[in-house]
Image (cartoon, rainbow, N blue to C red):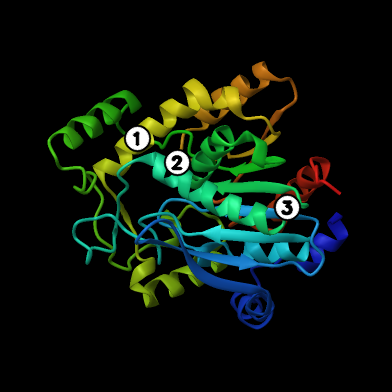
Amino acid sequence: MDRKQLREILLSEDGYAQVMDEVVMPYLEKRMEAAYCEREAGKKMYFVRALSDEPQGIVVLSHGYTETIEKHREAIYYFLKSGYHVFMHEHCGHGRSYRLCSDREDLSLVFVDDYIRYVEDLLFVCRMAAREFPRLPLYLYGHSMGGGIAAAAAAKAPELFSGIVLSSPMFRPSSAPLPWGLAALMAGAVCLTGKRERYLSGHHSYDGQERFADSAGISEARFQYYQQQKRKEPLFQMSAGSYGWLWQAVRLHRFLMDRAWRDIACPVLVFQAEQETYVSNKAQEQFVRKLGRRKEGCAEIVRVAGVKHEIFSSGMEVLEDYWTRIFAFLIANRSDLQ
């Protein structure tokens, strides 16, 4: 898809909600099926399978912390329009997928017992997609927490993927105002005391008072559209991290930096937000340098000026370049079996 074609499908902020409701959603409803799958007995993962009219590849989306599939319907629309089937599940502790909190009524808290669970769940969905369409190249697109999970998955099963796109990936979360080492030490200590489901300091249950000024994006129309959906559905109202989640983020960071970069076999495209406050840009740069030492030219980092963490929640000028680069990357790394 060239820039001219892309401009025709990109959504501007003007009339965003109306276009989403009257154009994007009807288009998706005709091509998208929702279901549950189980990697482990009794642990149901909610996922969608969306099929492009003229497929040239498959993209598996891995969403970020406290997000759901609804947050990425616009992205799914762009992938479908550009010729890619899309598979996407909601991670453990998010949305309609299984949760591990002992207090099943607390829908605000994000908790996971082991980061490997995130990785294996994602690989389960990837293998499901690969089995159904074995002659199409398979790509990963991961945002934030989902980007760190995607990178770990690509290291665990390097034979599966033709390329991975990581948007503001969480190779480690921001721990400000605490130094990362101290935050990691505290998380480990709290978990050792048996309080791994305790809310992180400063975190609280969902109250519906999120403000655009404090959000992770610079598109108010996109922010308001998703907030409306979040207010209506309690299962979407994740808003707080647990010490257990943070400790697993520590372990994921160690795996990515110590081992994962050695095993990733496919090209990697990383987008970095200039006004980042949620994840560490320094860790992103370290990871890309390590990949580059293993194989020159296998990883690229694109620094996006003037944007916050959710690069996909920006204005038209940013989005045009962002999506143009993504589709060019997918095409350049096409390795189907036909």
On screen, residue 263 above or below 79: above
Sequence-earlier tag: 1 or 3: 3
Residue type, numbered disc 2: Thr
Of badges 1 and 3, nearer the viewer stands 3
Expressed as whole percent of the image width and height from the top left, the position of residue 67 reads 45, 58
Q: CA distance from mark 3 to mark 2?
A: 39 Å
Sequence-earlier tag: 3 or 2: 3
Quadrant of the image containing the N terminus: bottom right
- Write down the residue under mark 3: 134
Residue type, numbered disc 1: Ala
Query: In the orientation shown, which residue stands out farthest toward the top?
Result: 293
Q: CA distance from mark 1 to mark 3?
A: 44 Å
- Write down the residue under mark 1: 176
Looking at the rendered structure, the secondary structure element under dot 2 is loop
- Asked if marks 3 and 2 touch (Cβ < 8 Å), the reply is no
How crowded pointer 3 is (Cα within 10 Å; few <14, some 14-19, many 20+) is rated as: some
Q: CA distance from mark 2 to mark 1?
A: 8 Å
Expressed as whole percent of the image width and height from the top left, the position of residue 132 reads 67, 59
In-image side of 102 versus 148 (left or right): left
Residue type, numbered disc 3: Pro
Is residue 308 visible in the rendered structure shown here? no
Query: What residue is drawn where x is 50% and y is 39%?
Result: 148
- Asked if marks 2 and 1 touch (Cβ < 8 Å), the reply is yes
Query: What residue is drawn where x is 35% and y is 56%?
Result: 93
Expressed as whole percent of the image width and height from the top left, the position of residue 160 reads 65, 41
Looking at the rendered structure, the secondary structure element under dot 3 is loop
Looking at the rendered structure, the secondary structure element under dot 1 is loop
- Write down the residue under mark 2: 277
Query: What residue is drawn where x is 24% and y is 47%?
Result: 202
How crowded pointer 2 is (Cα within 10 Å; few <14, some 14-19, many 20+) is rated as: some
Expressed as whole percent of the image width and height from the top left, the position of residue 288 reads 61, 26
